[in-house]
Image (tube, rainbow, N blue to C red):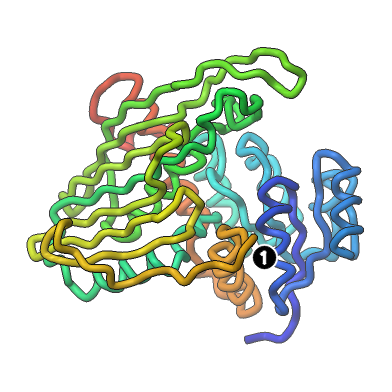
Amino acid sequence: MASHKVRVGIIGTGFGASVQLPAFLGMKEVEVAGIASSDSKRSLELQKKYKLPMAFASYDELLECDEIDLVSIATAPAEHERLVKKALEMGRHILCEKPFTMSSSAAKGLLKEANASHIIHATDFEFRELPALKFLVSRLMAGVTGRIVFGELRWVVGSWADAKRPWRWQCDKAQGGGVLTALGVHLFNTAESILGPLDKVQAVTGITITERKDEEGKKKPVTSEDHATIDLTGKYGIPVRIVLSNVDPKGSGFGISIRGEKGVLLLESTSQEYGSGLRVREGASPDSAKIVYEDPKPEAGTDARIPPFQALARRLVAAIQEDDRTFGPSFQDGVRAQMFLEGVRASAETRTWVDMGKSSK
């Protein structure tokens, strides 16, 4: 591996500050040059707190800084396209949060530009780095279930179950909010990575809490879905179901059920916390399946999102150091996720099966 440090600039001080920043700071092969916020005071606060070399007054100032090799974009999805396009113009390597853009046509255009620019590009599907999921995949590869006949992925939590939680951009479909963009694209990406390409979708989505008050107490409509049931089929004929909700206070968290001719593999969560307390069970049936893997207990106060993000970031940084343009998950995964989103929404509107390859805009 090359010895030079990769200089990283982070755009966005939500997920960017709570997960990306501590993850990058914990990597000796990285130098965090600085972080940019829509509020320049917030950037300055984080620079002082973490003793970062620079604070940026705007997103564009960071993108134009010649002392940055990799730009990590963690803003609302509606801002991604412009920021990715400018990062490409500046010749930066790019890590973009999901969903990649607001339309598959825009995503395809950026993928084409990125490939032509010869930069390393990534979409942050860090979920695939979870040790429990990797263990489940290893058992699938070992053939313990035999021929797979059905797969179900669930992510049912209560993160937005409190009707008093203030309105934010996540409540606005136009800004890329909703359970599909927050959780659904992760499960779709995971499903395709372990069960093969998926092309047809039938979905039902809904909004349970239709109105929230903003920080100033003004009532605003919620236009982004907070629950969905999605059926998919694909190249190998395996039926797949994805069940989502972020308004279920008694939800079971994240889970996967893979059923095969020889037996089952179950990934289960013991809490609603992201990526924490996961275990894998294996056996002839769900009732008889035994625990074959359990996550070690995390240290108190540890954000469970940081380790999987850091695992993806380490691979990305290594790819940049070695000029390896085969890195994945790439912008191509971002394109696929956007086609999924468009297919789900088209199906929910028409109440019919939709070919995702034909639903893109």
- Closer-to-camera residue (315/138): 138
> Does residue 86 appear left or right of residue 130 in this picture?
right
Residue occupying image coordinates x 26% and y 72%: 139
Q: Secondary structure at mark 1?
A: helix
Q: Quadrant of residue 214?
A: top right
Query: Which residue is under mark 1?
Result: 23
- Closer-to-camera residue (266/222): 266
Instruction: Check the image and name the residue furthest to the top.
Output: 219
The reply to whether residue 118 is in sight is: no
> Does residue 319 appear left or right of residue 35 in this picture?
left
Q: Is residue 266 above or below residue 83?
A: below
Give the x, y percent position of residue 359.
36, 32
Give the x, y percent position of residue 105.
49, 37
Give the x, y percent position of residue 59.
80, 45
Q: Is residue 27 above or below residue 278?
A: below
Give the x, y percent position of residue 171.
58, 27
Q: Quadrant of residue 206?
A: top left
**Three-letter amino acid code at the position of disc 1:** Ala
Query: Dot 1, crowdedness within 10 Å: few (<14), some or many (≥20)?
Result: many
Number of dots carrying numbers: 1
Q: Quadrant of the C terminus?
A: top left
- Closer-to-camera residue (60/40): 40
Q: Quadrant of the N terminus?
A: bottom right
Q: Is residue 335 above or below residue 223?
A: below
Q: Is residue 261 above or below residue 216?
A: below
The reply to whether residue 77 is in sight is: yes
Residue occupying image coordinates x 85% and y 58%: 65
Instruction: Check the image and name the residue furthest to the left.
Output: 261
Residue occupying image coordinates x 59% and y 32%: 170
Residue occupying image coordinates x 83% and y 64%: 33
Q: Quadrant of residue 144?
A: bottom left
